[in-house]
Amino acid sequence: MLNKRQAKQAYKSKEEFSRDMGFIPGKDDVLLDSFDVTSQYFRLSGEVQINRARVFVNSLLFRTPNGRFVS
């Protein structure tokens, strides 16, 4: 997904982002809401659970004007 995002200008709206990423309305709403596409900052969060262990991942990415991501 990062390669796809680097290949074009920043998305203008969540609708454009949703269409390009192939999200299914109603099914992927939580995933779509985990992305903030209103600025050059993007939030990526997730959770992995294996048996009793649980890991949370939270990242804040910044997209520079030349299209590169910096975490």
Image (cartoon, grey):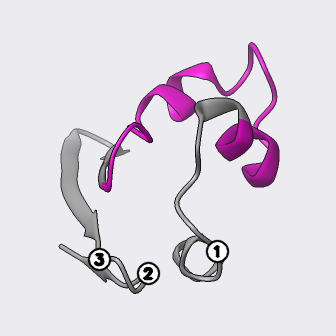
Coordinates of residue 60 in the picture (x, y in percent): 19, 56
Amino acid type assigned to the residue bearing label 2 in the image: Gly
Q: Quadrant of the N terminus?
A: bottom right
Amino acid type assigned to the residue bearing label 3 in the image: Thr
Which callout, 1 or 2, points at the residue further toward the start of the chain?
A: 1
Rate crowding at label 3 as few (under 14), some (14 to 19) or many (20 or more) other CA atoms within 10 Å.
few
Question: Is 28 placed above or below 7 here?
Answer: above
At horizontal 54% and vertical 80% (from top left) the residue drawn is 6
Extent of the magenta region: 16-40
Residue at which label 2 appears: 67
Q: Secondary structure at mark 2?
A: loop
Q: Which circle marks residue 64 in the picture? A: 3
Asked if labels 2 and 3 touch by Cβ distance under 8 angstroms, the answer is yes
Q: Quadrant of the C terminus?
A: bottom left
Report the Cα–Cα distance between label 1 and label 3. Answer: 12 Å
Coordinates of residue 20 in the picture (x, y in percent): 78, 53
Residue in the foreground of this view, choosing between 48 and 52? 48
Residue at which label 1 appears: 8
At horizontal 58% and vertical 68% (from top left) the residue drawn is 9
* Quarter of the view holding residue 32: top right
Magenta stretch contains residue 12:
no
